[in-house]
Structure formats: structure tokens, C-alpha cells
Image (cartoon, rainbow, N blue to C red):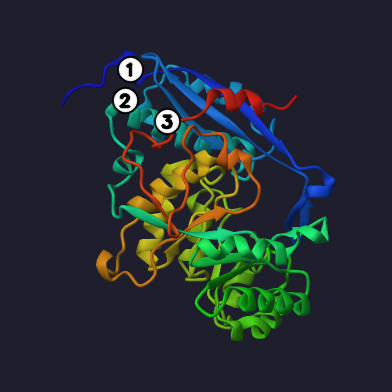
Amino acid sequence: MTAVPDSAARIARITLHPVLHVMGEAGAYGMARGLVAARGATIVEVETKGGVSGFGEAWGPPGFVAPYLDFVAADWNGARLVDHGALFHRILARNYHFGTQNGLMALLSGLDMAVHDALGKESGLPAHALIGGRARDRVPVYGSGGYFTADPALGLAVQLPRFRDFAACKIKIGRGVADDVARVRMTREALGSEMRIAVDANGNYGIDQVLASMRAIAGFGIDWYEEPLSPLDEEGYRALLPRREIPVATGEALYTAFAFDRLLAPRAIDIAQPDLALCGGLSQGRLIGQLCTLRHARLSPHVWGTGLGLAAAVQLVAAQPAYPAVLDSEADPPWVEYDIAENPLQDDLLVNPLRPVGGHIAVPDAPGLGVEVDRAALERFRPR
């Protein structure tokens, strides 16, 4: 076996690039739990001793992960890229008192993503080749939006036309059954019978409210009901299982495959939605995908950050096997979320952003995540 040259395969430095886009209070939008007036993240850059840089996305507002950098760098600086899995679990095991739902896990997620990008560039391979190989040449994406807005003039009716380039869409609900019905009816009437529609309550309901909402909207033909309950209400998801009228999806606020296993093992969810910027990166995303394969559940990564998170999600789904189906007869392939809101962190942070064509994104063949970060944009979006 040929050894990887230390000069090319060891981490020389880790740099954090906080990024922020401010919409302002008048332009705020969001979910049933509340609206946001700004969107941010931290771009993690891993540079090797050979001068190769890999990039990843860490979830959260600027500053959320920075306090953990010195803590993590003690283990990661000077380490071989190929040892990232051992490093991840060493930190997790040694610091079990921390738990996993924190900025440390978000930072480790960005690091894992960046390491895969750098490893791909070192080897000349796309990231999907490092996590199982390419199962599909393109991935289907659904338009994600239908937000609640501070300005009624920017509400659901104005957002619906943006979905027409997609075969599937997702809208926000969760402010009461009557409002859920009104929003779903408006969406169905505007987009027609062929549009696949999913809904997202962002965990704003208890189980009785979820059941009432499901009964009220099921007749409109809903593909899945996202985060019907709080992410930590595992018992609630298990109780909902035999009573649900719509397939259930969740995962954007679950950290590591351990949390997903607690819902996938009892078949309490139908669709797992890991956010690679906080669940542990591509390594944990791949493990979650394998759990989906074992439990015959669907995988659909959550994406609501930067173009790097979107690129990583495309790489993950590219490697997700069609099992138990074969690819040519796959009834419902794994979807990737595509944000339709104004989000320059998704659209302007990359030299050539990934854009859907005919409701699909072609899987990049370029090494690593297959995208190039615009360094000028990193500076332009730096919080002042």
C-alpha cells in the first residue's frame, strides 16, 4: 500500500470564516416558532501542509462555533486527513459530558465536511467516491419555502410561483389547524394536482394538535409532514407512529447518528433529514444514510445554510443506494432541499453555485465537494 505523503495529507491550520446576510426586521421570514432577520454560518477552512484547502459549513450564527476552535485544534492540527473519523470519535468519547447538541458538534461537522473536500482534492476524487461511490448522476431537489413573513406583502401567495420549476415543494405550517388548511389549500390550488407538496410545522405542535392537523390536510395529498413534534420528543414520535395519516419526516435538529437511530430503529419516522452542518458532517451523514438503508427509510438531507451545505448534501445523496429498489425502478428517490428564499449565502458564496435544472442538480465530478469558494465573497459576507 502506498503511504500518503505527510506533506500533503496533514492539517497545517484551521481557519474560521463567519458569514452573515441581514434581511432586516421588515424582511424577516421563517417558521411557526418565529421569524429571523438575518442568516449566518461559519465556513471552516482546513489547509494541508501541501497547500490544499478544503471547505465546510458549520451551522449557526457567526460566533457560535468559534469558542471551540482552540479546543479542537489541539487534536486536529498536524493530524492526517485520513484519520478524521478516529479524531471525531475520540473527541466525542473523551468529552461525553458535553453531549452533542452544541457548537462543538457544529464545528466538528464543518471540519468533517472540509476534510472530505480536502481529501477529494488531494486524491482527485469527488466526495461521493469517498463515502461509497456514485449511485446516481443527478439528485432531485424540492423547492423549500412558503415561509411566514413579517411583511404580509411577501407572504405565501407571492412565494408560490417560485415553485413552478420544481416537481415538489415544501411550505411552512404550524400556527393552528385552520391556518394549516388555508395554506395547503392555497398551495394546491395555485400549483395544481401534479405538484408534490410537503409541510413543515417545525415542532410547534403537541401530538393532539398534529393529529388534528393531519386529518384536516391529508385530503390535499401531502407527501410528508415534517417535524410534527419537538425534535427531543422521541416518545411522542413513537406514539404518533400507528396513528399518523401522513408520512413523518424529521432530523434537522438531531445531532449524530445516535439520535437518528433512536427514531429509525422503532420505525418512528419515514424520512430522515440530517443537516450535515450540525449532525456531524458527511461521515455521520453517511452513517445515517446506512441506517436508512437498514430500516428501509428514506433519506432527504435538510439544507438551510450556505452553498457548501447544499454541495455536501448533493454528494451524500449521490452516494445513497436505491436499495431495496434498483436505480432504474426507484419509486421515490432521495430528495435534497433547495431553499427558494433570497439567500446570497447559498447563491453568491461559490464561484459557480449549484442550481437545479428541471428539478434536479447534476452531481459534480470535480474533486472534493465539487464547488469552489469565492474568497472575495467570504470577505464580503464577513460580519462588520
In the image, 159 versus 247, the foreground residue is 159
In percent of the image, x 56 and y 49: which residue is there? 255
Above/below status of 70 relative to 294: above
Q: Hey, what amino acid is under mark 1? A: Ala
Callout 1 environment at 10 Å: few (<14), some (14 to 19), or many (20+)? some
Q: Is residue 131 visible?
A: yes
Instruction: Assign a secondary structure to mark 2.
Output: helix
Q: Is residue 345 above or below residue 45?
A: below
Q: Is residue 326 visible?
A: no
Name the secondary structure under disc 3.
helix
Looking at the image, residue 295 lies above or below residue 256: below
In the rendered structure, the answer to whether residue 320 lies left or right of residue 338 reads: left
Label 2 Cα crowd, 10 Å radius (few <14 / some 14-19 / many 20+): many
Judging by the rendered image, the residue that carries numbered circle 3 is 115
Task: Report if the CB atoms under discs 2 and 1 are less than 8 Å apart.
Answer: yes
Find the distance from the CA under tag 2 to the CA under tag 1.
7 Å
Q: Is residue 153 left or right of residue 272?
A: right
Label whose residue precedes the other's in the sequence (2 or 1): 1
At horizontal 45% and vertical 31% (from top left) the residue drawn is 372
Q: Position of residue 182 (x, y in %)?
A: 73, 78
Residue that carries the numbered disc 2 in the rendered image: 122
